[in-house]
Amino acid sequence: MYIFQSRSFYRLKLRISLPCPLILPVRTFIPGLGPILGVLANPLQTLKQLDESRRMLEETRQHLRDSYERSIIPPLHTFSRVPGFFDRKRERKVITTVLESTPSFTVLFGASSVGKTALLREVLSDDRYHVIYLDLRIAGFADLTSLHSTLSAQFENFFNRMGDLLPGYDHFKKEALAFKHARKAVEAGGQPPSFTANASSPIAVPAAIKEVQPADIARLMEMFQSALLRYWEFDPEKGFMQDHASSDDGEASPLRKPDAKKEPAPRLVQQQLTEEKEPKQTTPAQDANDGEEKVAKPVKKIPVFFVDEAHKLPDLVSSQDAVKSFLDSLVVITKQDRLCHVLHVTSDTFYMHWLRQMNVGQHCKMITIGDCDKEETKEYFEKHLLPTVPEKLRDGIQFDAVFDVLGGKLAHWSDYVTDFINSQGTMTMESFSHFLQAYSYIQFYLLDPSFSTYTSIPAHPTKKPENFTSDDLLTLMRILTTPPHFALYFPLCRKLGQPAVDAMIKSRVLELRYSRFETFDVQGAPAERPFVCAMSPVMQCAMKVVLKEWGEEEQPPRFDYREVKCLRD
């Protein structure tokens, strides 16, 4: 009995000492319940996040849409031939001769509406040239940042075009990338960023971006010079003609064959121009063999850096250091390396004075383009203008009478015929708009010689103020309205004073021509001396009318006019 009780008690004690199982509540997991609770807890914050996400999504869509539209925009090409261009054979031959010679820095002068741009568009539309064009009439830059972007975009386009057009020149698309990223960095707000690292951030981070400086313009032009050197030295069969044609491991570089000889870029440019003008003479048998074995070698396009209305350059870019760097770079790629032609076109003859002040003028060639002669003007009138005049009005236009007033300025002829047709043949020459403007212009200066005309060429800081009197202008008008209708510039300056003569030229009543080599509209002018003439034939006609009104035709001369009309020993 005692034993049984002891065992039962032991079993009971053992059961009590065993731990009881812990029963925990079961939690059911519902996906997405947390965010839902968060939305319910803070609905305003959720709405803000949704609006921000919607805005970012719309911006992304708009960005993709803009990128696609930009990709399908056709490239700008402003050097297609001008519709209805009248071929000026002699002037075109002068320009073509310059472009077929060794690359140089050329300044082309010509009065307003003489046809300089149309003539160059006709010549440069030839497939041999690729034009890097800056039209300062509608300049895409007004500071250093936009100038940097404009130049880099033009350079990028040039090398991309060469990679697309010339077989084997795909490498130059990589050259274009350098200008592309330089432009992108500038458009983002400054020059390409530099990278620095510090103790808190061992990874390099962009440093502060600075504004574009004159040194950045010089660097961009240096990149262009270097890329042009590689462009002219590149041969798709031999690769690059480099002095160091070996790689780091001592093996021959694939860019150049071991026997390739390096020639200077000027000689390569001139050699290509010579080969284009004088094709290599071969026999029929050689031609047949060459046709079977060799593929025609691609002809490199000649780059032409064309700046239209160049006299506006100092007014658009206020930094003289930047302009000086830009001009010096143009001298380097022309006079020093002979890599491309540079053409500056201007209607302001004092632009050459400014180039001399910038120590660049002595490296430039000068070409002057004038109006057409009588024979060319008559051809233009009969072939281009007269067919547009109704039959009943044609007898009202007498060529010789109109030529005596308008001369060979074709733009004025076109305007005159248009106004004559619109007036049903009732318009007289005195009511022609260009004559009225010239007449009023002269009267303004006679009544108030201080009446100023805008010019973008800055005056020299040490030069005396330029001004003239009514008597000075009347004297010069009497000189220019008597044959021959010109006056030598330097003898005239000695008689009237250079400040007075320069002021009258800047007023756009007169035109200064440095030579007569390329002009055919002023008869008897010396080819070896600068001379002054009326700005246009219609201006000369207006001078005669004004002299009659002022009673100055019969006034005694202030000096012997022969002293300024002919050369003396």
Image (spheres, rainbow, N blue to C red):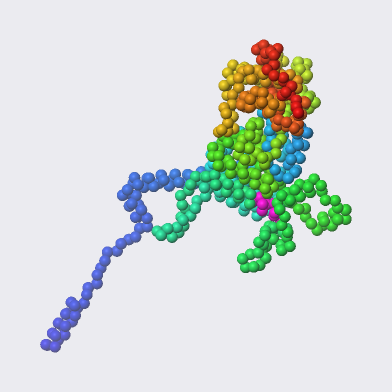
Relative placement, left or right, of 209 versus 428 is left
Image position, residue 318 (x, y; %) = 54, 37
Quadrant of residue 313 in the image?
top right
Query: Can you name the residue that lies furthest to the left here?
Result: 2
Q: Is residue 418 visible?
A: no
Q: Measuring from the top left, give residue 407's x and y in whole percent.
A: 74, 23
Q: Which residues are magenta?
A: 227-236
Where residue 240 appears, as percent x and y from the top left, is 68, 57
Q: Is residue 555 visible?
A: yes
Establish if 1 lies above or below 134: below
Q: Which residue is more in the foreground, 553 or 331?
A: 553
Name the quadrant of the N terminus: bottom left
Instruction: Report the side of 395 relative to 465 (left or right).
Output: right
Q: Residue at x 55, y 42 (%)?
A: 321
Which secondary structure type mostly characterizes the magenta part of the structure? Answer: helix
Q: Is residue 471 magenta?
A: no
Q: Residue at x 68, y 25 (%)?
A: 492
Position of 284 compared to 261: left or right?
A: right
Using the image as rendered, state which of residue 355 and residue 433 is in the foreground: 355
Vertically, is 478 above or below 211?
above
Tell me residue 19's x, y (percent).
22, 75
Quadrant for the C terminus, please: top right
Q: Nearer the viewer, residue 484 or 520?
A: 484
Outermost residue on the right side: it is 284
Is residue 232 within the magenta segment?
Answer: yes
* Residue at (82, 56) in percent of width and height: 290
| Residue at x-position 63% and y-position 17% | 471
Q: Image quadrant of residue 255?
A: bottom right
